[in-house]
Image: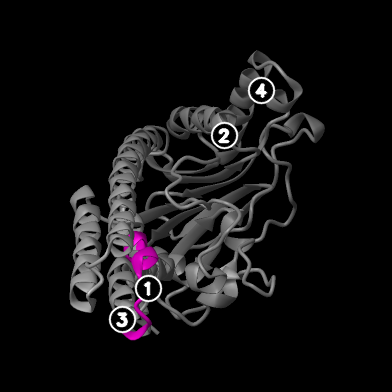
Amino acid sequence: MDDRSRGAPAVPPGGTRSGGAGQLARTLPFLCLAVGVAFQVSTPRELTGTPLFAAAPLISAPLFAWWAAVLFGGAGLLAITVFYAVTGHMGGITALHGLVTELATLLCVTAIAVFLNRVVRRDRNRLASARGVAETAQRAVLPTPEHRLGALRSGARYEAAQEHTLIGGDLYAARSTPHGVRLLIGDVRGKGLGAIETVSVILGAFWEAADREPSLHGVADSLERALTREGSRRAGIDDTEGFATCAFVEIPPGDKELRVLNRGHPEPLLLRGDGTVVPLKPRAFSLPLGLGELAPGPGEMTAGPFPPGATLLLYTDGLSEARNEAGVFYDPAVRLTGRTFASPDRLLDALVADVHRFTGGARSDDMALLAVRRP
């Protein structure tokens, strides 16, 4: 079945829920005003809806512009004044004291709401600036692969576990070389700046080795040496014990096969044109990059067919270890069986949306996806 017939949304369901919650929050100031007026009219004259009128500008402070808080506060002031005038509360010193007290309270709350609005807006601007820097840094460290790699088509996605967090320890790369198209997917141990430094080292070594080395074993050895050099320059046990799980793929030019070298990473999936999903499991597992000295050896490479119309999916454990509310792990092989996709981008959009539906939008780990299709 084609993905278009499934109607897989490109926008994660989590975004829809967030938008619905935002729309509901924006109606609260209006609701407070309406309930406040109804309370004033339907209750004894001694009771007042001032608390509801005061809540309206406060709720609007983080949601609207500063002048909206002034408008909500002004509407509350008008409602209180009209209520006192219509009910005859204007007469008498006690009534005037009550009116002045309520108006002064609402004026103070409105002023506080305007102040809070300015603080929130300033912090949002700073956060937006920080996100822009983070996005630029990620694009520099983890550039998006070209959509055309020789005769192949590719697509990539990076989904952070925390919303609006762009930089993490997952990585991918795709490059057309004299030896064919070479792909890399990986997951660095740890988080934060240390993981980003390791990602940068691995990708830098891959760009160089992918063109130079005649075999995937040579590429993996080059990355191993780069990690070893980087570890020797770092101080501290936590830094020097870093490692990364990786899967290397090579698709020779003009050949309908692929080769996989797996270094402790989740196995890639081959999605055939008939909807069959084939996990490319290695015959023997190898240790992750950075731990090669514990078990010296080139590792065992797996070869298999890559027929026309098939798509190769590489992913990090943020996909296979995503859980639903019952604690059940997401199984991409099962979820994708019986489905076909017209392009790598359609596959990745549908996969991201399906993971969001499965987990309810909550994940504990970043998720990197790389797909390559033979037309």
Mark on residue 228? 4
Q: What residue does disc 3 label?
A: 38
Camera-nearest residue between 58 and 316: 58
The answer to whether mark 1 and mark 3 are in CB contact below 8 A is: no
Residue 99: % across, % down: 28, 61
Foreground of the two, 283 or 39? 39
Tell me where residue 149 appears, x and y as whole percent.
33, 49
Residue 170 is left or right of residue 93, and the answer is: right
**Does dot 2 land on a helix, a strand or a loop?**
helix
Q: Secondary structure at mark 1?
A: loop
Q: Quadrant of the C terminus?
A: bottom left
Quadrant housing the N terminus:
bottom left
Estimate the spatial distance between the alpha carbons at disc 4 and disc 2, rounded to whole Å.
20 Å
- Kind of residue sitting beneath label 3: Ala
Closer to the chain start, of discs 3 and 4, is: 3
- Badge 2: residue crowd in 10 Å (few <14, some 14–19, many ≥20): few
The residue beneath circle 2 is 192
Dot 3: what SS?
helix
Reading the image, the residue beneath label 1 is: 341
Q: Residues within 10 Å of mark 4 (few under 14, many from 20)?
A: many
Mark toward the viewer: 1 or 3: 3
